[in-house]
Amino acid sequence: MKLYMHAAACSLSPHIICRELGLDIELVQVDRQTQRTSNGEDYLAINGNGYVPALMLDDGKVLTEGPAIVQFLADSVPEGAALLPEVGNIRRNEVQSYLNFITAELHKPMVLLFNPIYSSVHEEIRALISKRLAWLNGRLAGPYLTGDAFTVADAYLFVCLNWSPWTDIDLKQWPALHGFMARVAARPKVREALQAEDLQAFDADGVYFAPHAYLASSGRSGSPVRPQTPGRPHPRHE
C-alpha cells in the first residue's frame, strides 16, 4: 500500500495507525505547489481534490479522507479491533463519533486559521475551536478519548492538536488535553511515525512536533515556524 502524505499534515494520522498495526506501507510525499509526488506521479490523477491523505491499495484502488482510511486500516487486520472495535460493539460507534467530531469541529476550523483569506474571522474561528476543546477536555474518559484503549480517533486528535502552536491556541489551559498529547507522543509507534516524517519536538514539554527542515530554516527552536508563502495556506495542514 502507498500512503500519500505531507509531513505533519493530517496524513500523519493514518501513518500512525499503520505503525501501530505493523502494516507494510510506502510513504509517498506530495508537493503541494506542483501536485507532483516524490516518485513522479501526478497527484491530481490520484486524488482530484489535491489534498492528503490518499491510500492506494495493492490492487490500485484509492481511498481518500483520513477518517475513512484509518477505519479501513483497522478493519484490514485482526489486530485492528484494538484500535477500532468490531461492528455491533457500541464502542465502535463511540470512536466513529469522535472521528466525526474531530473532522468537523477541530480539523476544518483549524485549517482556516492557516489561511490568510479568512483572517478577518480568525478570532471568531479560534473562539469556536476553544469552546470545542473545553468540551473535549471535560469528556476525556481516561488516558484516551474512550478510556484506557488507544484508538484511531486518538491518533487523529493528536495530529490536529499538534497544530495548536501555529493557530495561537494554548493547550495548557486544558490540562487533560495537554496530558493527552504527552501520552500519545510517548507511544513507541507514534515516535516511529514522527521520526519517519523527520518531525522533531520544539517545545519544552516535548509534545509538539514540526519538520526538522522548518526548524532548521528558522535557526532556532522553542517556537513554531511558519514557512508560508504570502497569500497561501500553510502546506502542511490540509
Image (cartoon, grey):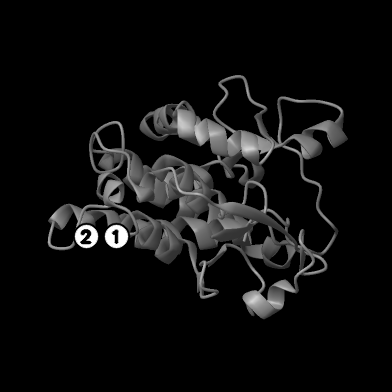
Quadrant of the snapshot with the N terminus: bottom right
| Quarter of the view holding residue 124 | bottom right
Residue that numbered label 1 is attached to: 96
Question: Which residue occupies the extreme front position in the image?
Answer: 59
Q: Which numbered dot is residue 174?
A: none
Amino acid marked by disc 1? Gln
- Identify which residue is drawn at 85% across, 57% down: 229
Q: Quadrant of residue 45?
A: bottom right
Please provide percent x and percent y for residue 182: 46, 27
- Residue type at tag 2: Asn
Q: Nearer the viewer, residue 187 or 62?
A: 62
Residue 217 % position (x, y): 86, 36
Give the residue at x 47% y 26%.
186
Q: Residue furthest top?
A: 204
| Secondary structure found at label 1 | helix
| Residue under pointer 2 | 93
Q: Split into 4 quadrants, where in the image is the C terminus?
A: bottom right
Q: Secondary structure at mark 2?
A: helix
Tell me which residue sits at (59%, 33%) in the image. Answer: 208
